[in-house]
Image (tube, rainbow, N blue to C red):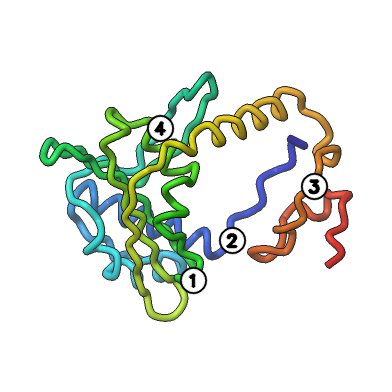
Amino acid sequence: LAGLPRPPETKAQRIGIALHAKAETFIKTGQIDYSSATPEEADAARLLPAILPYLPAAAEAEQKVKVTIDGVNFGGRYDWFQFRAEPGISQLGDLKTTSSLRWAKTAEELSIHPQPLIYAMATPAPTRIECRWVYVQTKGAPHVREVKFRPDFSALPGIVADGRLIQKAWADRGDPNSYEPNLGACEAYGGCPFKAHCKVDSGK
């Protein structure tokens, strides 16, 4: 809202981007890319063998999605979508990199999470979707956890309500410091990159 530049990507983000690129290559072509021109690509190449058993073959990968739900526009990019004529349930997948699997969400948490719900609504038959979220640990041994779940569409009204609030905030373009603060994540993930511009002191 303040028009500030996006902060530079962290090393963890660069590793995630590199691993997603290698996963996309495998899903689309079946080729395994172990190249490593950067340290982050080397980390991604180290993690790649652990996730290969969880990746589909010949699926749509890294596709942008747009969908309008009750007049509110949503968008994103899913990691893969595989249409299945039999048994009639398609598969929607997402790859998550994390420093520890303790950050992996449960099936119950993911079933009402905005990301899979929005992605599912953008598919041809949202009510016949199976979701597979694949978490891979980037620090230490590359442990993997696969979480399977079905979207719980009863959570959509709350997501749409949040979307309307976001649209209004964007349309109004008020001073970001005029909004009620949420100080619960000021220090998370290395700290908010916009703390220097924030007039609210977290007290930490």
Pointer 4 or 1: first along the chain: 4
* Nearer to us: label 2 or label 3: 3
List the residue tagged with mark 4.
Answer: 65
Rounded to the nearest whole Å, what is the CA distance between mark 4 and mark 1?
A: 29 Å
Rounded to the nearest whole Å, what is the CA distance between mark 4 and mark 3?
A: 30 Å
List the residue tagged with mark 1.
Answer: 102
Residue sitting nearer the eye, 97 or 113: 113
Residue at 27% over, 69% down: 49
Residue sitting nearer the eye, 121 or 107: 107
Rounded to the nearest whole Å, what is the CA distance between mark 2 and mark 3?
A: 25 Å
Instruction: Please state the total of marks drawn on the protein image.
Output: 4
Badge 4: residue crowd in 10 Å (few <14, some 14–19, many ≥20): some
In the image, taking residue 165 as reference, residue 92 lies left or right, namely: left
Secondary-structure class at tag 3: loop
What amino acid is found at the position of numbered circle 1 in the picture? Arg
Pointer 3 or 1: first along the chain: 1
Numbered mark located on residue 181 in the image: 3
Secondary-structure class at tag 2: loop
x, y percent for residue 2: 77, 37
Pointer 2 or 3: first along the chain: 2
Please say if 81 is above or below 125: below
Residue at 67% over, 63% down: 188
Residue sitting nearer the eye, 48 or 174: 174
Please say if 70 is above or below 82: above
